[in-house]
Image: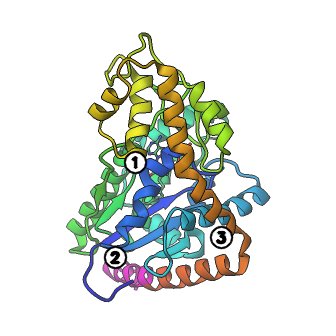
Amino acid sequence: MSEENKKIVFSGIQPTGGFTLGNYLGAIRNWGPLQNEYDCIYSIVDLHSLTVRQDPATLRRQIRESAAMLLACGVDPEKSILFIQGDVHQHAELSWILSCYTQFGELSRMTQFKDKSKKHPENVNGGLFTYPVLMAADILLYQTDLVPIGADQKQHLELSRDIAIRFNGIYGDVFTIPEGYFPKVAARIMSLQDPTAKMSKSDANENAKIMLTDDGDAIIRKFKRAVTDSGSEVRAADDKPGVTNLMSIYSAVTGKSFEEIEREFEGKGYGEFKIAVGESVRDTLMPIQEKYRTYLADKDQLNAVLKSGAEHASYIATKTLRKVRRKIGLD
Ligand code: ATP
Ligand code: LTN
């Protein structure tokens, strides 16, 4: 991190079950390029993942795998801070404090809470409800200016802003008010099996999602099976959610505009288009997978990166938390 006054970027991702192409195109892919312009802080938010029951050994493994994948996707520990949220206790502490400045009604309106409670009716726990407060703490601890996230996290970011504005209104300028940073294309990649639902890593249907670790054959096979719409024209339209989703993916990985794609596949059917999308995704992911295997194999290096990341993050977080404690009368 530089000593100059660069803007601060913070983002987090849950270490649950590997990353999807949606996570990559909607969020992680932007993390690398941002490092050249901003001071970036990236976190593997293990505490957030506890809102759904996790197997301990699997979670432990997935935290390491997530770190290796973020490095493979371009997060550079020489330029940015990469750390595990649970290694920096200030997150949990600020989260409790902020929860006392967040209304029950506000949390009840969060669509992710409503969706996830429906999905896991047997485990609608308090953490699931206060999840956005912990996210606000993640962001506000680092005086973050910009938060690169997919469109589905917009509502949570708005709440973080509301909490910060409210807190500042009472105590003066304690927190920087963060802004969202959304990708122009691919902010919302949809399921390959149901283009009206977002591609989600927790989807039980393997054919609905592309994992960043899928092998080349699986990638092509899943795209061949992707649900498309009636007709046969490769054209983006509201009544063609399947084809439009594939076009977004193709556009995101090749950099081609929708018009160029429509021209490229004029007079050709869905079959040819789906294979082209599959191949472009495969060619994007193969070099990432190679790096991923290298990072994952070097355990000592990975541990060293995460340890130094946590130390650095903790140093910054302590400054904010001290200020908060003083303002509210705890110190
Ligand atoms: P879950 O399936 O458990 O809800 P998820 O796939 O949504 O998980 P998260 O860890 O919640 O993954 O999200 C990580 C980042 O990826 C966030 O910035 C989120 O906005 C982005 N993201 C997730 N799914 C998509 C998607 N389908 N399209 C674009 N961005 C996405
Ligand atoms: N809720 C986010 C993950 C997350 C996050 C953050 C993203 C937790 N803390 C802070 C940006 C900034 C999600 O992607 N589901």
**Element type at marker 1?**
loop
Residue 119 is covered by the magenta coloring: no
Residue 198 in picture, x, y percent from top left: 48, 34
Q: Is residue 109 visible?
A: no
Neighbour tally class for label 2: few under 14, some 14-19, many 20 plus, Cα within 10 Å: few
In space, the residues marked 2 and 3 are separated at their CA atoms by 43 Å
The disc at residue 150 is 1
Q: Is mark 1 within 8 Å of ligand 1?
A: yes
Residue 294 in picture, x, y percent from top left: 68, 69
Q: Residue at x 69, y 64 (%)?
A: 293
Q: Quadrant of the N terminus?
A: bottom left
The disc at residue 328 is 2
The span picked out in magenta is 316-331
Residue 319 in picture, x, y percent from top left: 39, 84
Whichever of callouts 2 and 3 sits on the residue coming sooner in the sequence is 3
Q: Is mark 2 within 8 Å of ligand 2?
A: no
